[in-house]
Amino acid sequence: MSAVDETAPRTARPLTGRHVLIMLCAFFGVVIAVNMVMLRVATNTFTGVETDSAYRAGLAFNKELAAARAQDERGWTVEARLARSAEGVAVTVDVKDAARLGVAGLDGTLLLARPADRRGDRKATLLRDPDGRYTALVGDLDPGQWDLVIRFERNGERVFFSKSRVFLN
C-alpha cells in the first residue's frame, strides 16, 4: 500500500476545449440576454418617433411656412401662464393684437405634452373671455418639463400656433 502525502497541493483540473467552449457560450449568452432585455425595455418606453409620417410633413412644409408668415404679419402677442392649484394646473392665455387690444372670438386648444413620452399628453379646450383672455384647467400634472402647444382658429382656419418648453414644479 502506498502512502498519500496529505500536505502536497492538489492539482487543478486541466483546462480542456470543452471547458473553454462552455465558458464562451455562457459569456455570450449572458451578453445577448441582457441586450434583448434592454432592447425590449427601450422600445416599450420610447418609440423614438417624432412625427408619424415624415413624407406628409415634408409635403405640408410650404403650407406651414405660409401660415407662419401670416401669423407674423398679424403682430399678435400671446402670453401663457401656468399655475398649479388644488384642482390641477390652470393655463391662462392672453391674446393681444398689434394695437395691444385683446383678440376675442377665437377657438383655442392647447396640448401639454411630455417631450419624450406621448402617453402623458393632456389636451384641453381654451374657454373664451370677451377681453381676449382664454383659460383651461388641465388637471393634475407631474412636475418636470412639458411642451406647451397652443393653437387658435377662426372660422376653421388656423390663425396662431406656438410650441414652447415649460417647466412645472
Image: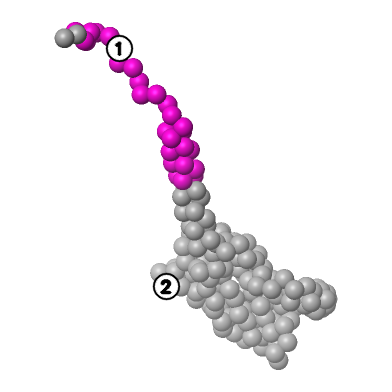
- Mark before the other along the chain sequence, 2 or 1: 1
* Residue drawn at 61 percent across, 68 percent down: 148
Q: Nearer the viewer, residue 101 or 35?
A: 35
Q: CA distance from mark 2 to mark 1?
A: 76 Å
**Does dot 1 land on a helix, a strand or a loop?**
loop
Q: Nearer the viewer, residue 93 or 40?
A: 40
Residue 141 lies in the magenta stretch: no
For badge 1, the amino acid type reads: Pro
Q: Percent x, y for residue 136? A: 53, 77
> What mark, if any, has residue 87 been given in the picture?
2
Residue that label 1 marks: 9
Q: Which residues are magenta?
A: 3-31
**Does dot 2 land on a helix, a strand or a loop?**
loop
Q: Percent x, y for residue 125? A: 56, 82
Locate residue 127: give its quadrant. Answer: bottom right
Q: Locate residue 154 relative to residue 11 in the image: left or right.
A: right
Q: Can residue 160 be seen by looking at this rendering?
A: yes
Residue 10 lies in the magenta stretch: yes
For badge 2, the amino acid type reads: Glu
Q: Can residue 101 be seen by looking at this rendering?
A: no
